[in-house]
Amino acid sequence: MGKADLHAVMDTFSSYAFGFLYKGKQAECTTTVLHNEVFPFYAEHALEIDVVLTNNGPEFCGTSPYSF
C-alpha cells in the first residue's frame, strides 16, 4: 500500500473514536470520514454534534494544496 495517513476523529465528551487510513492528508479524506461514518453514527444514536474541532493541520488551514 505504501505510505498511509491516519485520520482520527475523537469525541471529547465520551472519548469514543473513529480512525481511518488513507493514502493522503487531503481535506477530502477527512470530510469523507465525517460524512460517511461519524455523522451517520451520531444520527443513528440520536446524539447531537455541536462543534467540530481540528488540529489546525495544513489540510484545514489553507496552507496546503488540499485545503477546503
Image (cartoon, rainbow, N blue to C red):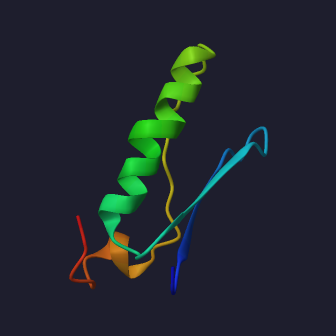
Q: 34 or 20, which lies in front? A: 20
Residue 24 location in percent, x, y? 40, 76
At horizontal 53% and vertical 78% (from top left) the residue drawn is 4
Residue 44 location in percent, x, y? 57, 16
Quadrant of the rendered structure where residue 63 is? bottom left
Tell me: 30 left or right of 13. Answer: left
At horizontal 25% and vertical 77% (from top left) the residue drawn is 62
Q: Which residue lies furthest to the front in this view?
A: 1
Instruction: Please state, as top left, top right, bottom left or bottom right, where the C terminus lies in the image.
Output: bottom left
Q: In this rendering, is residue 9 above or below 45?
A: below
At horizontal 48% and vertical 47% (from top left) the residue drawn is 52
Q: Which residue lies furthest to the right in this view?
A: 14
Residue 48 location in percent, x, y? 55, 23
Quadrant of the rendered structure where residue 19 is? bottom right
Q: In this rendering, is residue 1 above or below 11?
A: below
At horizontal 75% and vertical 42% (from top left) the residue drawn is 16
